[in-house]
């Protein structure tokens, strides 16, 4: 991905294993397996043109930062207050969706 973005499995005392999304210059976001599946489906839907949504929003239960993706003509912009947006083209958006889907399915 053109953005410095990683998704790693991390243990959590109350929620088990979480997907930790790290994007350069932004706070981490942590997703449960169920949240990962939901976000993956939403990202794929906008990337495939199957959804007319202009924003994907989730407040993950184990995260201090919300997941906000603004849908743009060329991809999505991952936004966080007081941070620069991280832009992903559609190919990168689908790759992120696949990483989240793979994490969700592993549980």
Image: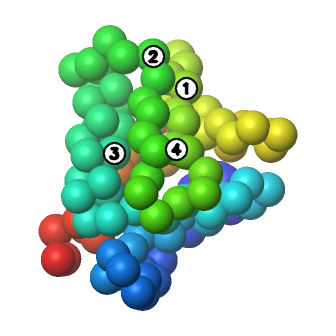
Provide residue 62's location: percent of width, then percent of height.
Answer: 46, 64
Instruction: Tell me, for residue 54, which label it has, or none.
Output: 2
Instruction: Tell me, for residue 67, which label it has, or none.
Output: 4
Instruction: Give the quarter of the image for residue 13.
Output: bottom left
Lower sequence index among marks 2 and 3: 3
* CB atoms of marks 1 and 3 within 8 Å: no
Residue toward you, 18 or 70: 18
* CB atoms of marks 4 and 1 within 8 Å: no
Lower sequence index among marks 1 and 3: 3
Left or right of 74: which side holds 50?
A: left
User: For numbered disc 4, what is the local secondary structure?
Assistant: strand
* CB atoms of marks 2 and 3 within 8 Å: no
* Cα distance in 3D space between marks 2 and 3: 14 Å
* Cα distance in 3D space between marks 1 and 3: 13 Å
Q: Circle 3 is placed at which residue position?
A: 39
User: For numbered disc 1, what is the local secondary structure?
Assistant: strand
Q: Circle 1 is placed at which residue position?
A: 70
Left or right of 15: which side holds 50?
A: left
Lower sequence index among marks 3 and 4: 3
Q: Which residue is the extreme one toward the front?
A: 14
Instruction: Give the quarter of the image for residue 84.
Output: top right
User: For numbered disc 3, what is the local secondary structure?
Assistant: helix
**Which quadrant of the figure contains the N terminus?**
bottom right
Seen at 55% across and 45% down, the residue is: 66
Task: Look at the image and tell me whether residue 96 can be seen.
Answer: no
């Amino acid at each position: 991905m053109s953005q410095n973005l990683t998704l790693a499995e991390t243990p959590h005392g109350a929620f088990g294993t979480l997907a930790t999304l790290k994007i350069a210059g932004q706070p981490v976001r942590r997703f449960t397996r169920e949240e990962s599946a939901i976000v993956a489906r939403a990202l794929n839907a906008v990337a495939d043109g199957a959804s007319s949504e202009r924003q994907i929003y989730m407040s993950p239960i184990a995260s201090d930062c919300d997941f906000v993706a603004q849908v743009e003509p060329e991809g999505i912009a991952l936004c966080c207050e007081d941070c620069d947006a991280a832009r992903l083209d559609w190919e990168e958006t689908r790759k992120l969706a696949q990483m989240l889907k793979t994490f969700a399915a592993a549980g």
